[in-house]
Image (spheres, rainbow, N blue to C red):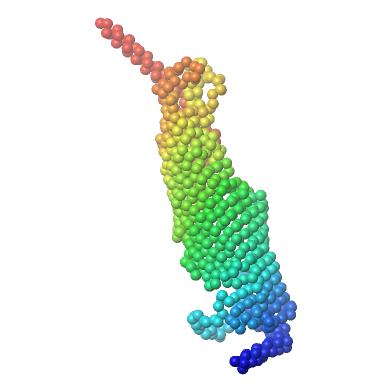
Amino acid sequence: MKVIKWFLAAALLVVVSVVVFITQFFDLNDYKPQIIDAVKQQTGRNMQINQDLSWSFFPTIGINLGGIVLANPETVKPTDMVKVNKVVASVAFMPLLSQKIEVKELTLDGLVVNIVNRNDGTTSFDGLTQTNKNQHTAPTDNKPTKTNFELSNIYIGGINITNTQINLFDERTDTQQSFNLSSLTVGEFALGQKADFSFEFNASLPEMQVTSVGNGELLVDQRAEIININNLKIEKTVTGPKLPNQKVTAQVLSNLSVNTKQQQLTLHLTALDIDAISGKGDIAVNYGNSIPAIDINLAFNDIDVNPYLQSAEKSNSTQQTPTSNSASKIEPDLSVLKTVDVDVKLTAKSIKADKLVTQNWDMVASVKKGVLKLTQLNADIYQGRLTTSALLDGRTKVPSYQFDVNLDGVQFRPLLTDASEIDMLSGKAKFAVKGKGSSLIVDNIKKTLNADGNFTIADGSLYGVNIPQMIRNAKQTLTGKGASNDNSQELKTDFTSLTGSFNLNNAVVSNPDLAMASPLLRISGKGTANIDSQTIEYALTTRVVGSLSGQTEQTDDSLAGIDIPLTITGTFAEPKFGLDTDALFKAKLKQETDKAKDKLKDSLLKKLGGF
């Protein structure tokens, strides 16, 4: 036994002696010219090593590099493709003899990568590798190779990456993008033990600046199959002239888990805050298939999208160019819908867009094989309920779509005024419409969209006109009394029900069976509304069925039973109502004539009865 011990000690002494000899008398810097020349031959690029190379074998095997520069192709600016200020890596020597890996230090500082896309389509990578045409590579054996090191025996004392920068230059668009990892620090790491980490990151994009800081805990199981990042906290700020208030802030607190064996990723969002919007949820990704399957389940509190809408409008107003008209004639590329498999469940306490306010949103949607399907979109809206489903088929060059929208119990006046600033109708509305079409080009939508629907509005008013008052004034004018100057009554016509069906085609809504009923009037007829020009044209018939007298007047039912033509023209915002007084006069004259005839007939019959 003593002989073996002495033998091992002697062997170790020899190894140490060799290591000391190599490190003391073998200088890597003597081989700088050969290294630079080899890189030149293999890549065609110039290389610089501006700092001395150093290495060690005991007690750690390590290398220290610095001042390394790899050039871009000639005539390309910036001239440097890759620069490294400092690289330090060291592994403890003695644990290697026990088949253990102990990385004492991993340091990278000042890595800068400049990638250029040139006007001729070439990039910084072109010509980087040169292959010898006469060189034949031996077939590789794909059988797994044995290793004496197990992952469970790996230990890393720490990772420190600082001042890393990637710059992307595009000569065709004359733009530059910069991504900077100011720092990435990972504490002591070993499988089965958590390691704290933190990072600082910023990016400079066209008209946008991004800064981000974060920290968390990294835990990898003993088999390196499950990777957990717990208590991941990220704070991000995005600034730019086209953003709401030129600034958007976001904070995320989450837990991330990756199962490399089952190829699954799960993200639990404990808190998600974007400006004043807050929420939480879960995201699961199965990336084992050719098309990753993504499952998203998010719940938000109150959402106000107005700051983002205003920013988008401002951006669109400043980006109108002569090419924008031609771009609007091109169908959008929906091929991305074929590359994803997504299921989404989204809820929101309320959503405010412009003046429109809705509550209790519940949305279920999916994207599969090129088809976007909105299974349901339900919300409380103005004391009623909205239910919607829709489908967008992007599998063909010209996409097609269909939808089904229902409103039930909605107070129509506040909805109409908040949604479109039109104060025309009130009442409790029930509305249903189904439609379909093809093409997402605006002009084509107007041509191809076809929809059918119906509506019922109960206990409401038609604003902008007082039809009973119009008829009273017309009667007084015809009788020579002159129109009333009483302006105390509101310009509205009350009704108990307003019903009809409609068809939408070529951006024109046709309503063939409008019917309105009230204790005083019955109105029926047909008309059209042009969505494109925002104009309206209706031809109606009004029949008086009750007394038109005001509350303080004596009962006047002299016009009862007379049909009076009524027209509605103008725009949605400013409709114009017209009463056909000539037709009213003829109808009244006919009524009086018929009464006179009946009276004369009765008188004659009485006289004849005396014979």
Residue 120 percent location from the top left of the image: 62, 69
Q: Residue at x 65, y 69 (%)?
A: 187
Residue 406 percent location from the top left of the image: 45, 43
Who is closer to the viewer here, 357 or 477? 357
In this rendering, is residue 463 above or below 376? above
Q: Is residue 258 left or right of residue 521?
A: right
Q: Residue at x 49, y 45 (%)?
A: 379
Residue 269 seen anywhere in this rendered image of the structure: yes
Q: Residue at x 55, y 67 (%)?
A: 227
Q: Quadrant of residue 169?
A: bottom right
Residue 171 seen anywhere in this rendered image of the structure: no
Extreme bottom residue here? 3
Q: Residue at x 69, y 89 (%)?
A: 17
- Screen quadrant of the N terminus: bottom right
Extreme right residue here? 51
Residue 67 percent location from the top left of the image: 72, 75
In this rendering, is residue 200 above or below 239? below
- Screen quadrant of the C terminus: top left
